[in-house]
Amino acid sequence: MSNSSSITQFLLLPFADTRELQLLHFWLFLGIYLAALLGNGLIITTIACDQHLHTPMYFFLLNLSLLDLGSISTTVPKSMANSLWDSRAISYTGCAAQVFHVCFFFGAEYSLLTVMSYDRYIAICKPLHYGTLLGSRACVHMAVSAWAGGFLNGLIHTANTFSLPLCKGNALDQFFCEIPQILKLSCSDTYLREIWLLVVSVLVLFGCFLFIILSYVQIFRAVLRIPSEHGRHKAFSTCLPHLAVVSLFIITVMFAYLKPPSISSSSMDLVVSVLYSVVPPAVNPLIYSMRNQELKDALWKLIS
């Protein structure tokens, strides 16, 4: 293939070669996908219907569940369809759309997790200023900023990646369209432009990560000074789920992109990509519902 204009489709990496394993992959991903839809859907419905949960923390949690639904719906259904129909193909336009939505939802989710750490910091370290600093207008502005930041992230990366000439085939060593795999097909030195853009994105993510860590250092210092055991337990019950979600997201992404080449292989990359793109949206509702008694009570009230 001489350039990207002659590419009409890409070939994704299959999970298995035999028909039995392909069907096993389909049913496994279907179960995970339905669990993610059910868990995030219940959280969204519960928060929307229960007036007691109309607070900044649950408003941000509702947005997180929406992003999780979008994130897992970007990659999993196409992978399931390919396994079911014994196919590897994804159209050029479909691949571009997948890259955009992956960058969009991941960027927006990480921005929102940073905002949520700020919310917990104000709630625990500066409770008297909580209503002033996190009023309804401020919460909407922060949520819109997270979504807009994700949209801009997706737009820039997609436009930059698919403006590169591609001449090294059309096979991707990943089960969805991932930017590093597409860059391997580039035949021009202009791919360095995208590399620099990825480096800038990593620096921004590291800045957000540092902000989250500093926020939680202050939060834990404040929590340990709370005299009553009930007060400490209530504070931890709202902070630990968020910290667990942040840790799961960051650790899996960092391992995916920073692991040494000596342990890199197609099967390893496949497993790691599942860990950071499929597992978090499915387990996030479970993490929040297990630790948050207020959310569990509202959920049980809704169900019963």
Image (cartoon, rainbow, N blue to C red):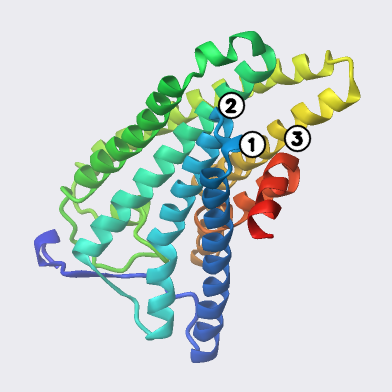
Instruction: State yes or no: discs 3 and 1 in contact (Cβ < 8 Å).
Output: no
Instruction: State yes or no: discs 2 and 1 in contact (Cβ < 8 Å).
Output: yes
Which residue is identified by label 1?
Answer: 242
Which residue is identified by label 3?
Answer: 237
Question: Is 140 placed left or right of 270 in the picture?
Answer: left
Amino acid beneath label 1: His
Residue toward you, 136 or 223:
136
From the image, which quarter does the C terminus lie in? bottom right
User: Closer to the observer: label 3 or label 2?
Assistant: 3
User: Relative to residue 75, is residue 253 depicted above or below?
Assistant: above
From the image, which quarter does the N terminus lie in? bottom left
- Residue drawn at (54%, 42%) of the image: 254
> Sequence-wise, which precedes: disc 2 or disc 1?
2
- Residue drawn at (37%, 70%) of the image: 78
Q: Secondary structure at mark 3?
A: helix
The image shows residue 102 at horizontal and vertical percentages of 37, 51
Q: Is residue 185 in view from this perspective? A: no
Which residue is identified by label 2?
Answer: 117
